[in-house]
Image (cartoon, rainbow, N blue to C red):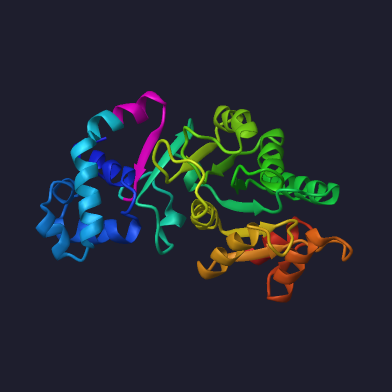
Amino acid sequence: MDKEEIYWLAFNAFQGIGPARFKLLLEYFGSAQKAFEASAEELTKIGLSKNLVLKFLNFRENFDPNSYFLRVKKMGIEIITYENKNYPKLLKEISESPFLLYVKSKNIKEIFNLKAIAIVGTRTPTNYGKKITEMIVKQLVDKGWVIVSGLARGIDRVAHQTAIKSKGLTIAVLGTSLDYIYPPENKTLAEEIFQNNGAVISEFPLGAKIEPGNFPARNRIISGLSFGVVVTEAACDSGSLITASWAANQGREVFAVPGPVTSKFSAGTSELIKKGAKLVWDVNDILEELNI
């Protein structure tokens, strides 16, 4: 990393500066370093609230960007800024793109340039949901697709595991930092993804644990990395429907698998189909719609 990118990393470590505010700072000051070193008066002038500026000044006084960068590197984590050539091209297309990603991958120069599709669903799948997810993931991997999911319990876990078992590539997008894998039982799975040339990524700084707002934010990255989102099994209150909503807003295709009408875990996918999601019977339904 060059010195400028270290200051991108510093802003990422500060809670309160998201993609929109960081873009504003970068445009006004011309560089992240100048923005980081700006006076309180200058920061207030561009529209940051006094409380946020005071919070930032306190953070800056106690934060060493170089030490933080060394911590990240010691963990084997790569940093990809929005301006880096390895930043995922599809993710750049969405509004509120993360200005920085933390990535663990042996395949960082290639994996984000391959065609990818997201597979998501309930954290408490039925046997039907598991079998359908395994079938669709295997078929997609056989066609050369990278599988994107959120390393959550349930369908996400099945999707990642099936991709690895099928000798394919998979990307796990976390709602926590890379040094705090959640749920904890998926730490081994995260390592398997890394060892099998996949990628484990997050926009959250070291030490970021479970926050309610992090997971909907994470979902925009899952859909943003993908040409489409497939919901294989979901109840009406499933978080995977948030991912489907992000996909629709981002201009991505939304797919849903029908399920037994007697199962509450089919209600969410049925609702998506009613709203216009493409009904998926097998992988051909996905490939025909994407036409890639």
Q: Is residue 30 left or right of residue 193?
A: left
Q: Is residue 259 left or right of residue 159?
A: right
Please give the name of the residue rendered at 44% of the width and 41% of the height, measured from the top-left corner.
Answer: 208
Looking at the picture, tell me which residue is in the foreground, 90 or 119.
119
Please give the name of the residue rendered at 16% of the width and 58% of the height, measured from the top-left corner.
Answer: 43
Number of disc labels = 0
Looking at the picture, tell me which residue is in the foreground, 154 or 4.
154
Q: Which residues are magenta?
A: 69-82
Percent coordinates x, y for residue 164 in the rendering = 66, 35
Percent coordinates x, y for residue 207 in the rendering = 42, 36
State which quarter of the image contains the C terminus.
bottom right
Percent coordinates x, y for residue 113 in the rendering = 48, 47
Residue 281 seen: no
Looking at the picture, tell me which residue is in the foreground, 247 or 283.
247
Q: Quarter of the image holding residue 60?
A: top left
Please give the name of the residue rendered at 67% of the width and 40% of the height, measured from the top-left corner.
Answer: 163
Residue 16 is covered by the magenta coloring: no
User: Eyeballing the image, is 19 above or below 142?
Assistant: below
